[in-house]
Amino acid sequence: MLVATTPMKKIRTKIGATRKVIGPAHLENLHPCFLPLPNHVCQIQSGPNYDYYSSIMRFTISSPVMSDAVVDYNLLNGNWNIVQQQNVFLERSKTLYGFASSVSTKPQNSKGFHVADDADSSNETWNVLTEFYACEYYDVSSGDGVMVPLTVVYSRRHKQEGSPALLHGHGAYGELLDKRWRSELKSLLDRGWVVAYADVRGGGGCGRNWHHDGMHLKKQNSIMDYISCSEFLIEKGIAHKDKLAGWGYSAGGLLVASAINARPDLFRAAILKAPFLDAVNTLLHPILPLNAVDYEEFGYPLDLEDFLAIRKYSPYENIKKDALYPSVLVTSSFNTRFGVWEAAKWVARVRELTRYDPLHPVVLNLTADLVEDSKYLQIKELAMETAFLIRMVADTN
């Protein structure tokens, strides 16, 4: 691997002297150090790093089975320490909240570069939860044969065959699916739930082409991928056929709602947070809070081909009449990017057209508060979602 490819040549300066330009530099000549990462890392996010002259770089490491760890890494000598990591299991934690744990890489030598070995990459230093929770990966064949990545997390102690399952999905804007450890999911995991993440097309999990294959005229691919992952969980016995729930936020709400329209029998419940449900009407009105990126992602409905494609998957236009829909909790507010009227319209139409069953309620929760700006309101909303899932899914026979 080459860091620079500038050819060797001489350059004459203004005073007539000559100097040599540095030629190709090989990676091993730079003697790099490597940070031994824990297993199942899903995201590494840079911290503030305001001091441009500092040799310390701060970043956050996330994993489905490890609480977020804030790490300081010394670029000069390869030393690193955990500045802060959430304490999940109190007395069982290896790294307490605010406690620094330091490990140094092996001494460098002039003949090569250091690669972390098995001892370096051990999870002993990290506050990982793999002793209690397992993380597995699957490749699921979608309807057109494309393999879709599926991540499954469950409790080693409480997992049973045919457990309730919660399937997350987003699949838009090329964004990575949030698979970080979230403390609110611990309540479900400890009750035997399986928490799964479907990296459907339209997201950023597999590169730029993966995003393009799930946007605009190809949006149906995202929905097909999500349904395939749902069927896979049931067919493999990972989830009980009557205890599968979906979860989607924003554009992920469009994904989950469209999957419910296509296969209402596949799901027992769903959570739609600030969802994008009325795509046709919202995109037709440019005065609404959308921008050019949204039209690139979903299409421009004044074009006939785009209009027909949007109408084909838009959740509001494709509700099945007289079908039995799963229990759905739709949460939105007057301060979200997608209008609160979208959630209200979709809920009203589902209640009007679908078959009524008191065991399958469609609940609308609206608030005028900025939930994202209040930790208390966030916890309150998460508690409501968890209670809804337990009541609608886990308590059913």
Image (spheres, rainbow, N blue to C red):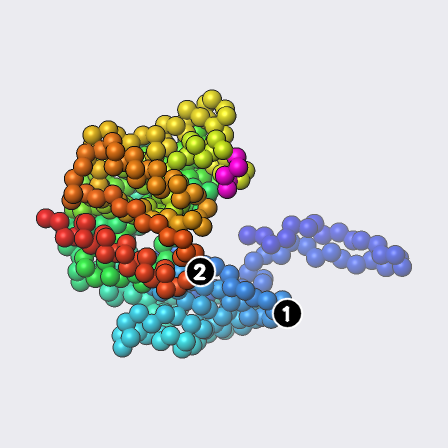
Residue 236 to residue 78: above or below: above
**Residue 285, how many percent across, how many down?**
49, 33
Q: Secondary structure at mark 2?
A: helix
Specify the principal SS of the magenta part. Answer: loop
**Residue 384, how many percent across, how many down?**
27, 56
What residue is pinned by disc 1?
53
What residue is pinned by disc 2?
373
- At x 43% / y 29%, what residue is drawn? 217
Q: Does 269 sit left or right of 199 as displayed?
A: left
In this view of the protein, can residue 114 be seen by the observer? Answer: yes
Q: Residue furthest right?
A: 15
Query: Counting other residues with Cα less than 10 Å from the Cα at mark 2, is it few (<14), some (14-19), or many (20 or more)?
Result: few
**Residue 342, how many percent across, how many down?**
38, 39
Q: Which mark is residue 12?
A: none
Q: Residue furthest left?
A: 397
Q: Does 41 sit left or right of 114 as displayed?
A: left
- At x 41% / y 76%, what residue is drawn? 98
Q: Does 140 sit left or right of 59 as displayed?
A: left
Query: Counting other residues with Cα less than 10 Å from the Cα at mark 1, is it few (<14), some (14-19), or many (20 or more)?
Result: few
Residue 236 to residue 105: above or below: above
- At x 36% / y 61%, what residue is drawn? 377
Q: Secondary structure at mark 1?
A: loop
Q: Does 111 sit left or right of 195 as displayed?
A: right
In this view of the protein, can residue 225 be seen by the observer? Answer: no
- Read off the magenta span: 286-290
- Chain-order first, disc 2 or disc 1: 1
Residue 151 belongs to magenta span: no
Amino acid type of the residue that numbered disc 1 sits on in the rendered structure: Tyr
